[in-house]
Image (tube, rainbow, N blue to C red):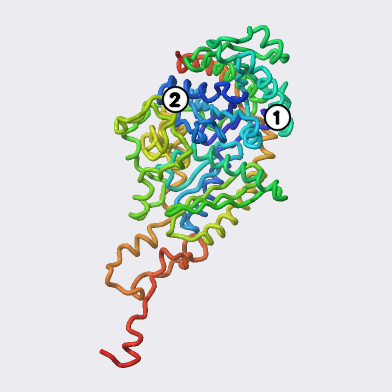
C-alpha cells in the first residue's frame, strides 16, 4: 500500500520486479541505478549469492522530488527468480503497490515465464491481493538475443490481462525507463483512485524548498533535537557503518572520489562496499531536523534525505525534552580521582522513570582492594 | 492493498516520537526506528546520522518477514521479538501492533534487559497510538490529489533520461 507520511511529507510506493530466474530483473535495477542522477537515488542493496544470483531481494530507493510539498519516493525491489526461492519471493510482495513482470523473450524460456506468472498469481492471492486490481506492466526482455518470440506471440501467452507491455534490452537500457515510468504512473493513478482526497489536506501548506545542503555540509549540521551525546557515543555514531556481510552487495558507481578502485556497474560483484560511507549523507531524522533543513522542505534534497521537517516541530522538541545533560556529563566532569561518594548519584528525577542506575555503563564499582593485606595487617 | 494505505499525520508522529525518545532515554540506547512491515521507515529518534535508514528499514523489515516464515514452520504464528548481537552494537526488534516494527539500536553502555524492559513498555504505548490512527485514517481518507499524479509524470521525464 502507498505510505503517506504527513509529518515527514513523504509518499512512498513499493514497486516489485517479478519474473523467472535470469530474466533481467536485477539488470533493470542496475540500469536505473546507473542512469538516475545521484541526488535522486539511494544506495542499491543486493542480497545475492556468491554467484550474484539474487537470494532475497535487490533494493533501490529513488526519489523523484517534491510534488505539492510531498517527496515522492519509490522503492524498487526485485525478487529471486529461481523456483526454489518461493518463500522469500513471496515475502517481498508484501505491501506491493505496483508490479513489473520481466519476461524472457526467448522461445525456450516460455515455460518458465508462464510458471513464474502462475506463481505470482498464487503468491498475490495468499496476501489477499487480486492480480486484476494491481497495477502491472510487463516487459519482454532480451529482445537483442536470437531465438526470441514476437511480441504478438508473447502477448498471446503471457498477457491475457492486456497489461501495458514494453520491449526491453535491460543490458543496454532499452525499455527500462519506459517500463518504470509507466508503472509509476499507474501506481499513482491507482493511489489517487483509492484516495478520497477532499478531507485530507495537510496541516501546513508546503513551503518552497531551498537549495539543499551539499553532501559535504550535511554531516556537520547542528543537532538541535538530539540528546547531547557523550563523547564516546558521538564517535561511535559518526564512524562509518560496519562492513556489511559478504553477501550484501552495494552498488555505487558514482561514489565519492575516495574510492578510486570503484568497479563499473556491469561487474556487479563489489563486495563489502558498504563499509565506505554511503554515497550521500544519511537522512536527517524527521524529528531532528534543524539548521538549514528545518526551514526547507523537500524538492532538491539529495536522496535519501528525508523530507524537510516543518519548523513548527522544531520548536516543540527541544533539547530539554531529551536526556538532560545529566549522568554522563556530570560523571565526565568529575575529576578521575574523586570517589563514588562525592559524585552526584541522585538521578531519580529523570522523567519520573525508575533510575537506570543499574546500567553497567554508569555504575561506578568500588573495588575492595587490599582485603588480605588488611586482614593480616600487612602494610 | 492500495485501499489500505498507511497514512500518518503529524499529530501521531509527534506522539510516536515522544514515546520513542522517552524509551531511548530510559534504556540508554543509541537510536530507535519505527518501520512498517512493508519496509517503509515511519520515524526515527536518536543518533541516526551515520545510518542509511532507508536501506536499514527495508532490510530490517525483510529480516523480520523471514523470521515470520520460520515461526510458521515451527508452529508459531509470529516471533514478536528479535535480537541481533554484534561486537559493539546490537539490535532489538519488537512488533508494534499488527503492521509495525520498533527497532532499537544500542551498545554496551546499556544492557539487553534494560532495552527489553523499556521497549516492551513503549511497544504497548505505540500500539495504542496505531489503533487510534487506524480509526482516523478510515475516517479521513488518504490525500493524494489529481495534481500529484500529473506533476509526477513531468518529473519522471526529467529524471529518467537515457
Q: Is tag 2's residue or tag 1's residue first in the polypeptide sequence?
A: 2
Q: Can you see residue B6?
A: no
Mark 2 chain: A
Residue A124 badge: 1
The total of numbered circles placed on residues is 2
Q: Secondary structure at mark 1?
A: helix
Q: Is residue A303 left or right of residue A84?
A: left
Determine whether the residue tagged by mark 2 lies in a helix, strand or loop.
helix
How far apart are the two marked residues, 2 and 1, measured between alpha carbons? Answer: 30 Å
Residue denoted by label 2: A40
- Seen from the viewer's position, the closer of residues B128 and A135 is A135
Q: Give the position of the N terminus of chain A as an image quadrant.
A: top right
The image shows residue A251 at horizontal and vertical percentages of 43, 30
Q: Nearer the viewer, residue A358 or A267?
A: A267
Local crowd at mark 2 within 10 Å, few (<14), some, or many (≥20)? many
Residue that sits furthest to the left in the current view: A379
| Callout 2 touching callout 1 (CB < 8 Å) | no
**Is B128 placed above or below B139 here?**
below
Coordinates of residue A182 in the picture (x, y in percent): 58, 15
Q: Is residue A127 visible?
A: yes
Q: Can you say whether A182 is above or below A55 in the image?
A: above
Task: Measuring from the top left, give residue A77's x and y in whole percent.
Answer: 56, 29
Which residue is at 65% across, 21% downward?
Answer: A190
Closer to viewer: mark 2 or mark 1:
1
Image quadrant for the C terminus of chain A? bottom left
Chain at numbered mark 1: A
| Quadrant of residue B162 within the rendered picture | top left
Residue plotted at (65% across, 20% down)? A136
* Residue A197 lies in quadrant: top right
Amino acid at each position: 500500500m502507498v505510505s503517506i507520511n504527513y509529518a515527514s511529507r513523504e509518499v512512498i510506493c513499493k514497486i516489485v520486479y517479478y519474473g523467472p530466474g535470469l530474466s533481467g530483473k536485477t539488470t533493470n535495477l542496475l540500469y536505473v541505478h546507473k542512469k538516475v542522477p545521484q541526488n535522486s537515488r539511494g544506495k542499491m542493496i543486493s542480497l545475492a549469492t556468491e554467484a550474484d544470483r539474487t537470494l532475497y531481494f535487490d533494493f533501490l530507493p529513488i526519489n523523484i522530488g517534491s510534488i505539492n510539498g510531498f517527496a515522492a519516493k519509490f522503492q524498487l525491489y526485485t525478487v529471486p527468480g529461481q523456483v526454489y526461492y518461493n518463500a522469500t519471493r513471496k515475502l517481498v510482495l508484501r505491501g506491493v503497490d505496483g508490479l513489473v513482470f520481466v519476461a524472457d523473450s526467448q522461445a525456450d524460456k516460455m515455460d518458465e515465464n508462464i510458471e513464474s506468472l502462475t506463481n505470482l498469481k498464487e503468491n498475490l492471492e495468499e496476501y489477499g491481493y487480486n492480480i486484476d486490481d494491481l497495477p502491472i506492466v510487463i516487459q519482454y526482455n532480451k529482445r537483442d538475443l536470437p531465438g526470441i518470440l514476437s511480441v504478438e506471440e508473447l502477448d498471446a501467452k503471457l498477457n491475457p490481462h492486456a497489461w501495458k507491455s514494453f520491449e526491453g534490452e535491460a543490458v543496454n537500457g532499452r525499455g527500462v525507463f519506459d517500463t518504470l515510468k509507466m508503472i509509476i504512473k499507474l501506481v499513482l493513478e491507482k493511489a489517487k483512485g483509492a484516495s478520497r482526497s477532499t478531507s485530507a489536506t495537510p496541516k501546513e501548506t508546503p513551503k518552497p524548498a531551498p537549495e539543499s545542503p551539499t553532501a559535504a555540509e550535511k554531516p556537520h549540521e547542528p543537532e538541535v533535537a538530539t540528546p547531547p551525546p557523550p563523547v564516546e557515543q558521538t564517535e561511535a555514531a559518526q564512524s562509518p557503518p560496519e562492513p556489511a556481510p559478504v553477501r550484501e552487495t552495494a552498488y555505487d558507481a558514482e561514489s565519492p572520489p575516495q574510492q578510486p578502485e570503484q568497479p563499473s556497474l556491469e561487474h556487479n560483484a563489489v563486495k563489502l562496499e558498504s563499509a565506505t560511507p554511503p554515497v550521500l549523507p544519511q537522512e536527517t531524522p524527521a524529528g531532528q531536523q534543524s539548521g538549514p533543513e528545518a526551514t526547507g522542505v523537500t524538492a532538491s534534497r539529495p536522496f535519501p534525505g528525508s523530507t524537510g521537517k516543518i519548523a513548527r516541530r522544531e520548536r516543540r522538541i527541544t533539547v530539554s525534552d531529551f536526556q538532560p545533560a545529566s549522568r554522563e556529563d556530570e560523571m565526565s566532569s568529575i575529576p578521575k580521582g574523586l570517589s563514588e561518594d562525592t559524585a552526584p548519584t541522585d538521578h531519580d528525577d529523570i522523567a519520573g522513570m525508575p533510575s537506570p542506575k543499574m546500567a553497567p555503563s554508569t555504575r561506578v564499582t568500588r573495588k575492595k582492594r587490599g582485603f588480605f593485606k588488611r586482614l593480616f595487617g600487612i602494610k | 492493498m492500495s485501499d489500505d494505505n498507511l497514512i500518518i499525520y503529524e499529530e501521531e508522529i509527534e506522539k510516536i516520537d515522544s514515546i520513542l525518545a522517552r524509551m531511548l532515554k530510559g534504556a540508554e540506547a543509541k537510536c530507535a526506528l519505527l518501520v512498517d512491515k512493508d519496509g517503509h521507515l515511519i520515524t526515527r529518534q536518536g543518533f541516526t546520522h551515520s545510518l542509511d535508514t532507508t536501506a536499514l528499514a527495508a532490510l530490517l523489515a525483510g529480516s523480520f518477514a523471514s523470521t515470520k516464515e520460520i515461526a510458521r514452520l515451527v508452529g508459531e504464528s509470529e516471533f514478536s521479538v528479535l535480537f541481533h548481537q554484534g561486537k559493539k552494537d546490537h539490535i532489538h526488534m519488537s512488533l508494534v501492533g499488527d503492521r509495525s516494527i520498533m527497532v532499537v539500536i544500542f551498545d554496551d553502555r546499556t544492557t539487553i534487559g534494560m532495552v527489553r524492559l523499556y521497549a516492551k513498555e513503549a511497544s504497548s504505548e505505540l500500539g495504542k497510538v496505531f489503533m487510534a490512527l487506524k480509526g482516523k485514517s478510515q475516517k479521513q481518507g488518504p490525500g493524494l490529489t489529481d495534481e500529484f499524479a500529473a506533476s509526477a509524470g513531468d518529473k519522471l521525464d526529467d529524471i529518467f533520461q537515457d
